[in-house]
Amino acid sequence: MTADRQPQKSNHGWVFLLLRWVAALLILGILFYLLPVAPLRSALARFPFSRFIAVLLIYLVALTGGITKWHTVVNSAGAQLSFAASAQCYTSGLFGALFLPSIIGGDVARLAVGISRSPRPAAVITGNVADRFLDVAAQLTLISLGLMLLPGSLPVPLQAPAKRLLFVGVVGAAAFWGLVLALYRPILRGRSIRIRRRLAQLRHAIRAVSRRPWRLVFGWLLGTSVQGAYVVLTALLGITCGLRLPLRVWLFAWPLAKIAAVMPITQGGIGVREAALVVLLAPFGAPASQVLATGIVWEGVIITAGLLAGLTAFLLRYSEFPQARR
């Protein structure tokens, strides 16, 4: 019975993956249909392949900052992972976010590799959750910076939603931690020894993270720098496609588009991110065709980097076998 359910569950996962890619292509197709094709084709034709390679290389360098951040945060929880193991976890997550049949495929792949490589699985889970909170904090930091740099030029229709998003983000994080503290003892009460032991390991990992706040601050700064580098790269792509906007506009719109892409509608947020950018940049006078062209090139960078990340994870995994034999 169990053996029959496993292939059925796997088939459902691949069907779900296919549907998310179909949704991504459908959203992009709608954008192509609604927007004029000639300006879009002209903007894409202006982008040389050599510049694509240059942006891809800079993107890969920035990814090493993301690996360093994840490695620092997870080890602060006591995961005891080497940098090579953290690189394998992180690159597996990047590949999984685009090509695995799951809503949170990237995190599932990252945790699966990390738990298999770490003597303290609870520390890997805790560190990954803390890393996700740092990513959200980095996005909110960039949005706040964009709002501070756009006091007068921010369109009125966007002022209230942007401020509301910041408020919801801060209140949501505070409510989450308050709920965890309030329900901690009720959850422990009446549980089996095995569950209590696992919760104790999780509590130990949380305490290990809280004892090293400077590592969390370092992770937040590094994450903000990495996300800021992505914003700058997108702005440079836009300039090449003929889209000239102040960097402060990208600081405001790009993180919001990335947050919108987290919704489990398409695989890796493809299509949703481009549609969000078109909507967010329209009040600033950005031509929709050039915004879409910039988003398409950026998706090309992300997909290529995801494939290279999968290859890197495979090579790092393959390199373990000679060491195990020795």
Image (cartoon, rainbow, N blue to C red):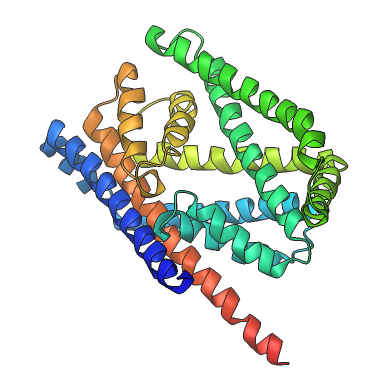
Q: What residue is shown at x 79% (from left), y 57% (from top)?
A: 194
Q: Pinpoint residue 125: horizontal percent, then vertical percent.
A: 69, 52
Q: Is residue 90 among what the camera can see?
A: no
Q: Is residue 170 above or below residue 230?
A: above
Q: Is residue 195 above or below residue 282?
A: below
Q: Pinpoint residue 314: horizontal percent, then vertical percent.
A: 52, 74
Residue 263 is drawn in which quadrant? top left
Left or right of 310, for residue 28: left
Residue 228 is drawn in which quadrant? top right
Q: Is residue 106 among what the camera can see?
A: yes
Closer-to-camera residue (167/60): 167
Determine the residue located farthest toward the right in the rendered image.
Answer: 211
Left or right of 323, for residue 55: left
Q: What residue is shown at x 85% (from left), y 49% (from top)?
A: 204
Q: How many marks?
A: 0
Quadrant including the C terminus: bottom right
Determine the residue located farthest toward the bottom in the rendered image.
Answer: 326
Left or right of 46, for residue 82: right
Q: Pinpoint residue 231: horizontal percent, then vertical percent.
A: 48, 37
Q: Is residue 91 above or below residue 103?
A: below
Q: Pinpoint residue 34: horizontal percent, then vertical percent.
A: 14, 31
Q: What residue is shown at x 83% (from left), y 55% (from top)?
A: 193
Residue 241 is drawn in which quadrant? top left
Closer-to-camera residue (62/77): 77
Quadrant including the N terminus: bottom left
Left or right of 13, for residue 151: right
Closer-to-camera residue (250/27): 27
